[in-house]
Image (tube, rainbow, N blue to C red):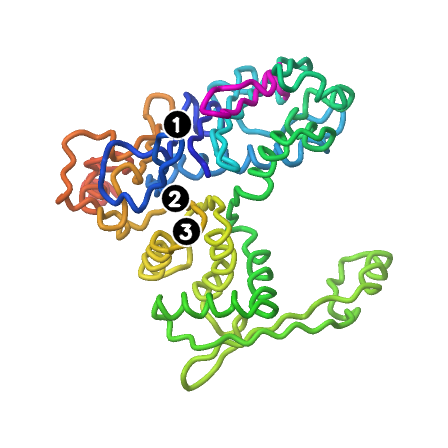
Amino acid sequence: MLLEFACSNHKSIRDEVLFSALASKDNTFEEKTKEISGGRVLKSAIIYGANGAGKSNLIDAIAFVKNIVINSINHQPGQGIRQIPHKLDGFKKDSTYRIQFIVQNVRYVFGFSLRNMLVSDEYLYYFPNNRQTKIYERSGETFSAGNKFRGKFNTCKDVLKPNRLLLSCAANFSAVKEISDAYSFFNDELVVYDPTNQYNWMNYSLYQMNTNPKMKQSVLNFLSELGTGIRDIQVMIDEKELESSELPPFLSDEFKALLLQNNVNAITARVCYDKFDVDLMQDESTGIQKLFGILCPIIDIMINGKVLICDELESSLHESLVFGLVKLFMGAQTDKFAQMIFTTHETGLLNLELFRRDQIWFAEMRKDDRSTDLYSLAEIKNVRKEDNFGRGYISGKYGAIPMLNLNFADIVSEM
């Protein structure tokens, strides 16, 4: 599970911002928390903010850390780490990233800094018996291991480069359990939903519904709870040979010949209602297509206790579907503790029957330097439980809303 994430000098984020999934002293909705190591962890969190306030950049920073942990081992000599710093600070000031998480009931803290697109420092600690223990610390291309891990990372010395993380190298070139566990959090447990690549999720979902009867039934149960009227989905997967006429004309003859050597899977899906059925990809709305695409991954996340990070969950979905999806996720009774952290503009979710105050976050753009600030509703004073939070957010009571003082009548009169 994810406990905290902090970063600085990443896109619109200039000074360090901190997101925390650690519960406050609020004792409402205790079922939405999990007690571990003497503290309580939140099952979900929702992040609001105006367009351009930087909430998506927080998600981008988490995705960036996941990606560099997994892939920096493949960076070639002379290749810098691609990251976009804040405009006022640039590459010459450190960009910092720190993440705290739990794997196998053990807490880890991992962090690193970048300067001039290279790693300037890095560290990994864990907390066996709730005591901080050093796994390694790194400065530039040199590192020191903790007492328990001396000599364990010697195989990494030749592969560690300024554009590679030691965690990425050690996961591939050492056999340290704590390294494997920490790496598995990024590779397997931390799931970042990319709305620009949602068809990969769709293919996964359709394959699951074709081959896994239990998964299919779980999806149908969810759809029934959401009131979609969908009774069944029939998925057919056929292997076929590509025809040259199906390939784009701009491809070279050599590349066409290579593609024609391989068979492809043709996937079709029919969505069945009470009195008719339709083709999922041809006849259904974008919202229903997205719903089918995300349900199987979300069910997998819930069952296996993973962490879902999602930017603008409501995109292409009706507000009632978003509300139902979030409510089902938060109310699901599973053996493992899953988390969902997402950004949204949907004010219908802003109520304390669904979220605790420490689960509601706001991103706001500072006017002086155009940088992102991040804070939770629990940090705002004089907030009462009976307040209309959606109305308060729209009116600017909690910040994070643009153009509140703009007089549109004056603007129109001047045109």
Image position, residue 266 (x, y; %):
67, 70
Q: Disc 1 marks which amino acid?
A: Leu
Q: Nearer the viewer, mark 3 or mark 1?
A: 1
- The secondary structure that dominates the magenta segment is strand
Q: Which residues are magenta?
A: 118-138
Q: Are marks 3 and 1 in contact (CB under 8 Å)?
A: no
Image position, residue 271 (x, y; %):
49, 76
Find disc 1 in the rendering and name its residue: 18
- Compare residues 316 and 342 and report the one nearer the observer: 342
Seen as rendered, the residue at the extreme bottom is 275
Q: Disc 3 marks which amino acid?
A: Leu
89 vs 383, left or right, is: right
In the image, what residue occupies the spot 80% across and 61% down? 259
Q: Nearer the viewer, mark 2 or mark 1?
A: 1
Label 1: element kind: strand
Does the stretch in magenta take in 131? yes
Find disc 2 in the rendering and name its residue: 343
Residue 284, compared with residue 370, is above or below; it is below
In the image, what residue occupies the spot 31% across and 50% down? 346
Label 2: element kind: strand
Q: Quadrant of the C terminus?
A: top left
Is the residue marked by circle 1 packed among few (<14), some (14-19), or many (20+) residues within 10 Å?
some
Image position, residue 380 (x, y; %):
21, 30
Find disc 3 in the rendering and name its residue: 313
Q: Quarter-wise, where is residue 224 in the image?
A: bottom left
